């Protein structure tokens, strides 16, 4: 594949054994530090994500288009880990962040893979863009629109103020519009526009979410006031 042919492992600059050894040397201390220095929940999520990526997502690339959904879970777990590291709990806020990252990955990756269909096909990878092109575009559009709903859910779950779904609506509508163009036109131009939009859309959405977040201190004070004397 053109996109991977220059990587050190592919070119034989490092051996598979060295690659596995380096990965283990990073993963084992990393999981240990998360478990012992942060909390066991975050460490367990990290270990699960490594397992999901190496033992499920990667082998599935040659077997089924379901690999994209599994890969989206892999990408959704890191912000969940950030939440559990800060709060020590796996609550609705963590799940909402994970859901946003999960949905965002479909327009991001499906648009990227559209212009790499020949490359994936030569490599023997079963991607939606290769085997199910209409589904590829339909799923991308569906998850673009899901971002609008997930943003509206944030204040309902008491994660942000009601300002967030309002000020995030323009960028969510814009990426949904590009998702529709990709679905309708199915060409290199529309897929490229959707992909590049996804690159700035996610950091902008999370920045808006951060500026509209509910105060944890305020929640604690409210709980103290409501406690019976």
Image (cartoon, rainbow, N blue to C red):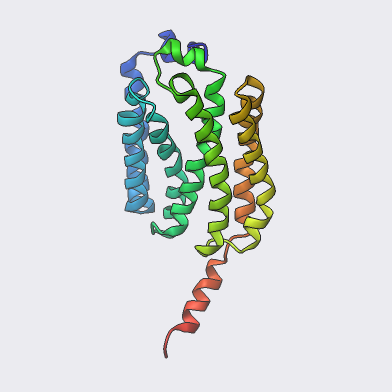
Q: Residue at the location (39% across, 56% down)? A: 90
Taking the image as shown, residue 146 lies to the left or right of residue 17, namely right
Where does the image place residue 204, in percent across and percent down from the top left?
A: 65, 45
Where does the image place residue 197, in percent across and percent down from the top left?
A: 65, 34
Q: Look at the image and tell me whether residue 218 can be seen.
A: yes
Place residue 62 in its image quadrant. top left
Where does the image place residue 171, in percent across and percent down from the top left?
A: 67, 45
Q: Residue at the location (53% across, 46% down)? A: 146
Nearer to us in this view, 188 or 9? 188
Place residue 65 in its image quadrant. top left
Q: Residue at the location (54% across, 70% down)? A: 217
Image position of 217 with respect to 72: above or below:
below
The residue furthest bottom is 229
Taking the image as shown, residue 217 lies to the left or right of residue 200, namely left
Image position of 175 with respect to 40: above or below:
above
Nearer to us in this view, 191 or 154? 191
Image position of 216 with respect to 144: above or below:
below
Q: Residue at the location (57% across, 19% down)? A: 115
Where does the image place residue 143, in percent across and percent down from the top left?
A: 52, 41
Taking the image as shown, residue 122 lies to the left or right of residue 169, namely left
Q: Quarter holding the C terminus?
A: bottom left
Q: Look at the image and tell me whether residue 24 can be seen.
A: no
- Callout count: 0
Place residue 64 in its image quadrant. top left
């Amino acid at each position: 594949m053109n996109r991977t042919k220059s990587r050190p492992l592919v070119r034989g600059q490092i051996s598979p054994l060295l690659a596995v050894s380096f990965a283990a040397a990073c993963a084992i201390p990393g999981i240990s530090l998360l478990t012992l220095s942060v909390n066991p929940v975050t460490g367990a999520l990290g270990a699960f994500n490594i397992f999901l990526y190496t033992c499920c997502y990667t082998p599935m690339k040659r077997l089924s288009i379901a690999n994209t959904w599994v890969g989206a879970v892999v990408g959704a777990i890191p912000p969940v880990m950030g939440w559990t590291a800060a709060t020590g709990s796996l609550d609705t806020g963590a799940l909402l962040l994970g859901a946003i990252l999960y949905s965002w990955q479909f327009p991001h990756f499906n648009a990227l893979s559209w212009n790499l269909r020949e490359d994936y096909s030569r490599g023997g990878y079963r991607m939606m863009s290769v085997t199910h092109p209409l589904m590829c575009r339909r799923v991308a559009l569906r998850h673009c629109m899901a971002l609008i709903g997930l943003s509206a859910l944030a204040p309902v779950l008491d994660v942000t103020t009601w300002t967030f779904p309002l000020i995030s609506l323009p960028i969510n509508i814009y990426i949904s519009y590009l998702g529709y163009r990709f679905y309708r036109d199915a060409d290199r131009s529309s897929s490229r526009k959707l992909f590049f939009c996804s690159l700035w859309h996610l950091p902008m959405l999370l920045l808006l979410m951060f500026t509209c977040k509910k105060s944890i201190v305020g929640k604690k004070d409210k709980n103290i006031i409501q406690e019976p004397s």
